Amino acid sequence: MSLSSFVIPRNRKVQFELEILIEELANVPLVAGLYYIKWKLKNGKKTNGITERALIKYHSIVWRYKLHNSVQIVIGKDGVLVPCELSIKELNGGKEVNNIGKLLLNLSEYVGLNSMTRRYLLQDSKINSTLKVNILHIIFVNLLIYIVNVISHILFCFS
């Protein structure tokens, strides 16, 4: 149990249900190997997981891994949702594991939006591969008023 659970009042913690589909890693310059993904969620019930190992076919790796979790996001004093990070690491190998790249997603930016599919360029990577992630939905369980801080604009969500 973290220290923030004692410091932050209960009325500023919002419970969300999220459903994310990690579809594929495209533009992989390699032609052989087994690849898998490790994911880690900061404020969730199940905080980490791993996909099955998949082979490269036509310079892409397809997982179609569905991540369904319950997340607790804190509302800041200004009414804006505090960032909630999902960390995704792409790895390859059997006995010897090599890190291909990683991706950090701020899930607070996608709360209340409809299903959206995006391709993200891997960070800390030597290859220019893109990870296709479909954010199916992030819906709230608690009925509260909050503001979602999105990069391009601010979306007001009322319940």
Image (cartoon, rainbow, N blue to C red):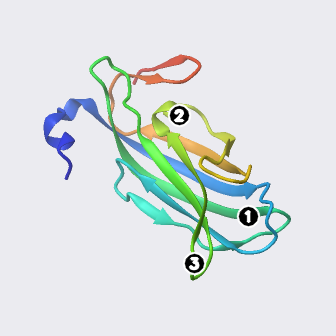
In the current view of this chain or complex, which residue is farthest to the left?
Answer: 6
Question: Where in the figure is residue 105, as x and y percent of width and height?
Answer: 52, 42
Tag of residue 96: 3
How far separated are the C-alphas under marks 2 and 3? 36 Å
Kind of residue at disc 1: Ile
Kind of residue at disc 3: Glu
Question: Where in the figure is residue 65, as x and y percent of width and height?
Answer: 60, 61
Q: Residue at x 70, y 57 (%)?
A: 24
Side of 131 relative to 9 (left or right): right
Where does label 1 land, which residue? 61
Q: Is residue 28 above or below residue 119?
A: below
Q: Nearer the viewer, mark 2 or mark 1?
A: 1
Q: Earlier in the sequence, mark 2 or mark 1?
A: 1
Q: Residues within 10 Å of mark 2 (few under 14, many from 20)?
A: many
* Quarter of the image where one finds residue 136: top right
Q: Residue at x 59, y 49 (%)?
A: 124
Where does label 2 land, which residue? 110
Q: Earlier in the sequence, mark 1 or mark 3?
A: 1
Q: Is residue 76 above or below residue 122?
A: above
**Quadrant for the C terminus in the image:** top left
Q: Are marks 2 and 1 in contact (CB under 8 Å)?
A: no
Callout 3 secondary element: loop
Q: Nearer the viewer, residue 67 or 149?
A: 149
Q: Residues within 10 Å of mark 3 (few under 14, many from 20)?
A: few
Callout 2 secondary element: helix
* Quarter of the image where one finds residue 78: top left
How far separated are the C-alphas under marks 1 and 3? 19 Å
Q: Nearer the viewer, mark 2 or mark 3?
A: 3
Q: Residue at x 22, y 30 (%)?
A: 11
